[in-house]
Amino acid sequence: MTHTPVGWHVELEFREEDDQHTRAAALVRLPDGSEVRAHGRASRHQVDANQPRVGEEIAGARALNDLAMQLLTKAHEEIDSASGRTSHPIHV
């Protein structure tokens, strides 16, 4: 049996709302044509230095975490649908 390699490309976009808030949006297009979108947010405390890259890293990590949880949920639904039973939780 041959296996065709599959790759996923995840897109992340960032938006600085103001000097204290950063938002991230993540998108992955799956080989079946479906898309999963997720969001993350970071807030800087007033006394912390303004470091936009850190806000992006936090907001991006939160968006990717949301994306991962949505993909796990999607996988569970597909397992349940194919097997006709409730699947065991996939622990992260």
Image (cartoon, grey):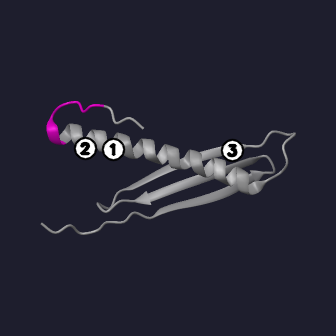
Which quadrant is home to the N terminus? Answer: bottom left
- Tell me which secondary structure the magenta stretch mostly adopts: loop
Q: CA distance from mark 2 to mark 1?
A: 6 Å
Tell me which corner region of the image, top left, top right, bottom left or bottom right, holds residue 79.
top left
What residue sits right under mark 1 in the picture?
Answer: 74
Q: CA distance from mark 1 to mark 3?
A: 26 Å
Q: How crowded is the residue under tag 3: few (<14 C-alpha within 10 Å), some, or many (20+)? A: many
| Residue type marked 2 | Glu
- In the image, residue 23 lies at what x, y percent? 65, 50
| Residue type marked 3 | Ala
- In the image, residue 75 lies at what x, y percent? 30, 44
Q: Secondary structure at mark 3?
A: strand
**What label sits on residue 78 in the rendered view?**
2
What residue sits right under mark 3 in the picture?
Answer: 42
Question: Where does the magenta region start and end?
Answer: 82-88
| Residue type marked 1 | Lys
- In the image, residue 90 lies at what x, y percent? 34, 36
Mark 2–mark 1 CB contact (< 8 Å): yes
